[in-house]
Amino acid sequence: MAIMITDECINCGACEPECPNTAIYEGGMEWTWGGGTDLTEVEIDGGEVIAGDAPQQPISDEFYYIVSDKCTECMGFHEEPQCAAVCPVDCCVDDPDYRETEEELLAKKDWLHQAS
């Protein structure tokens, strides 16, 4: 599963630099698929292909947020999600809407970082 940031977030920013996939963004900030990954383009739902550096709408305007499709729970990088490890208020928690197996998370990591 992916990690999510709850509305208990105090916007301290400790989590953002810890993410190996650059899946964490400050509230109100646009995000990109390519940021922190090797993706130069992505096929999204409906078959549309977008550039990896194309800005995407923020998921939250108030709190730091995690792009679930870029979150691998740090699989292949660390033994535990680093955002949760450094969060001073424990608001980085499992996202019940995004359940993924270890194999799926590792495959996502390989896709994001174009491992062969």
Image: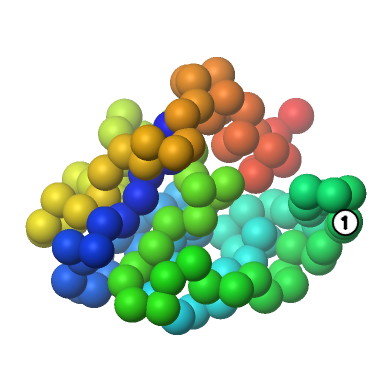
Query: Percent from the top left, x then y, of residue 83?
Result: 29, 51
Give left or right: position of 56 versus 105: right
Residue 55 position, x and y percent, is 67, 75
Task: Identify the image quadrant of the C terminus.
Answer: top right
56 on left or right of 60: right
Amino acid at pointer 1: Glu
In this figure, which residue is indicated by the disc labeled 1?
48
Asked if residue 18 lies left or right of residue 104, the reply is left
Q: Is residue 62 above or below residue 33?
A: below
Query: Going 73% across and 53% down the picture, which residue do you hit?
Result: 39
Q: Nearer the viewer, residue 107 or 77?
A: 107
Q: Residue at x 55, y 19 (%)?
A: 103
Number of numbered discs visible in the structure rendering: 1
Q: Is residue 77 above or below residue 103?
A: below
Label 1: which secondary element: loop
Q: Quadrant of the N terminus?
A: top left
Structure colour scheme: rainbow
